[in-house]
Amino acid sequence: MGSKSKTTTDTQAVRRMKFGLNITLQVALAIGVVVFVNLIASWQYLRLDLTQDRSYSLSAQSKAVLAKLEGEFQIITLLSEARSEQVLGVHERLRDLADEYAHYADNVSVNHLNVRRDVTQADKVFASITEAFKDELAPSIEAVTLGKTALEDAVRANTELTTVLASGLSTDSGTDEESPAQALYRGAASSCQSMGQTMEEANQQTDELLDQVLVNYAGAKEQVQAVLTDYNTVLGVIANRSKMMASSNSVDNADKERFLHVAELCQQGQDRLAGPLQQLDAAKPLARYNQVIYSLLSGASVVVLSEDRVKVLPVSEMYREDTRDLEETGRTQPQYLIEEKLTGAMLSMTLDQPPLVVFVLSGSGPALGEQGQFNLVAQRLENADFRVTQWNPAGQMSQMGQPTPPQPRPQAEPGQKTVWVVMPTIGSQMNNPMMMAANPRQQIADLLQERLPAGDAALLLLAVDPSAAVGIANPITDLLSTWGITPQLDRLILQEVQQDNRRTATSLEFPINDWPQDLPITTSLSGMQGYMRVVCPVLTGKADGTTHHPLVQVRGSRLWAQSDLASPDVVQNAKFSEAESAPSFDVVVASESNGQRLVTSGNYVWPSDALTSYGLLGPGTAELTGAAFPANSELFVNSVFWLAGLEDLIAASPRSQDVPRINPMSADTQWWYQFALLAGVPVAVVALGLSVWWTRRRA
């Protein structure tokens, strides 16, 4: 007997309830997953940067610096509307990367301001900058305040003096011819009236300067000081002439009394000006503060603020044109330096005792100042809070042609490291007996012998020295020999090049595009061009505990080191020498020996203003068009950082630190990809469709 199986079906209401619960549970689960993922994201910041050069992420070096930062830091971008696609790209990249610092460090905050729209917020930033400089500004503020009060008093006193002088003009001499007394009254009154107007204008202009949020105290000081100095001179002239007139027998008693009163008023005015002028003169220049103002007024910038320090970084210095692919592609690529600048700025602000850098001179012109040859690289070091000065151990010739005595050696503060930048030295100077007796080469060698073991470091900028070929002793090169370093100062690196007319010529100029990767000094120079001219080889050998790292190598075909330098036209007359040839020569070398550091260069011109300021339009145009040889200044500054033991200040970019995930495509590869996408894919689709049609037809 067959049995029937009983099947039951859910009612419509039950099915509706099941489906509803299922959908509700799925929605709740999806919401839970989203909430859970967002909670994890809020607890742990994670961002994948798949760009070739990691343009949107921080390098391991920057993260290490951020991990060691103490105190609160603010990164404030002061930008305006971009006028070009390139500038817009820089601004966007800057904002994105600045935000990364805040994501990775809780003590770093970021604020993006538009200087034209966010005026109130920008003013607060400027006030914070002034507060950070309050200790440095205090003497200048006091001097300007005192000078401003003296200027206001001088305006009132000048009015009284002018009235007295005018009263002398009202007296009747009884003749049509102007008397000497009347001439003095008229001339002095005119001078006082002119000075009164000048002082009132200066007073008003000073008020305007002092009313600014970011006060230009240097400008206010110079203006007040100049006007008060001029008025003090006018008072002195009027006082002297009035005293002379009061003692003259040709002047009547009434005028004598008046001139004595005028002289007394002038003397009182000078006495009141003496104190303010002295204090204005004693106020130190505000180099760092003035540089901050200049950078803020120069255009878009980034302000980095700590509790007591401030750095202003112009946006124009945060990118450069990478020319490595120029010959192949015909165009340059922007290379961003945002991370280098931001990380370096924050790290330099944490230095308790920034190093001392001393340019050691001997026989050459000054390194710093109005006639200085290295002001630009010195300014970059000062922007990193380094103390930079110069010293001549043997004295030099003054502007009047007189020998000056030796200067005292700069002394470092306790715990402060010193980097000695030694310029080319001479054995003696016949027209300066002080230098003949001093023997600067020996003094400098003795200095290095003393200070290098004590923890200092040195950068030796050497030069061609034909006297080395005749065996004249040089204590500096003797010292280098103990390091296994032999600078061949009696040789000059030359290269035979082919000209457009197929003739050959001799060149002593060398563009540098390839940089060794041994040290951070040159690792960060990837993509930058340098330039060397008139260089000597620097040979390195073995020495106990010493390692050498080539920083700059001159390479090329038909390259040799010319040893015959006797001819005045050595470059024009030199011929390629197979015996003296080599495929490359080291010209700048970094050395380490038992904790001591040294950089030796076979040329001293490459970090000079003449080359670092050389722009795309010629000498002195680097600030306008960008530096033609940006690696020159970077090499110098990086070398000083390395010598000071502050490699982290070099802050190499992710581009130079990382191996690219995807190498850039060549023009030919890009064309084939485009062809495959535009033509190959449609053809493949058509072929696949025909294949399916034919298969189904046969079936």
Image: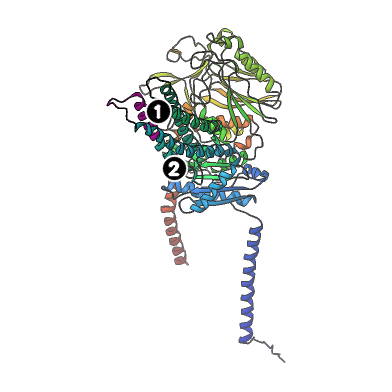
On the image, the x and y values in percent for residue 381 come to 57, 32
Q: Residue furthest bottom?
A: 1
Magenta span contains residue 173: yes
On the image, the x and y values in percent for residue 269 come to 49, 32
- Viewer-proximal residue among 585 and 502: 585
The kind of secondary structure element at disc 2 is helix
Q: Which quadrant holds residue 539?
A: top right
Q: Is residue 597 left or right of residue 336?
A: right
Image quarter where the N terminus lies is: bottom right
On the image, the x and y values in percent for residue 608 come to 50, 26
Magenta span contains residue 663: no
- Viewer-proximal residue among 233 and 681: 233
Q: Is residue 110 above or below residue 431?
A: below
Amino acid of disc 1: Ala
Answer yes or no: is residue 64 visible: yes
Answer yes or no: is residue 529 visible: no
Q: CA distance from mark 1 to mark 2?
A: 38 Å
Q: Specify the segment rendered in magenta.
A: 172-194
Q: Which quadrant holds residue 61?
A: top right
Q: Main secondary structure of the magenta part?
A: helix
Q: Are marks 1 and 2 in contact (CB under 8 Å)?
A: no
Amino acid of disc 2: Gln
In the rendered image, which residue does mark 1 sit on? 254
The kind of secondary structure element at disc 1 is helix
On the image, the x and y values in percent for residue 455 come to 69, 26
Q: Residue at x 65, y 51 (%)?
A: 106
Of mark 1 and mark 2, the one earlier in the sequence is: 2
Q: Residues within 10 Å of mark 1 (few under 14, many from 20)?
A: few
In the rendered image, which residue does mark 2 sit on? 204
Q: Is residue 420 left or right of residue 291?
A: right
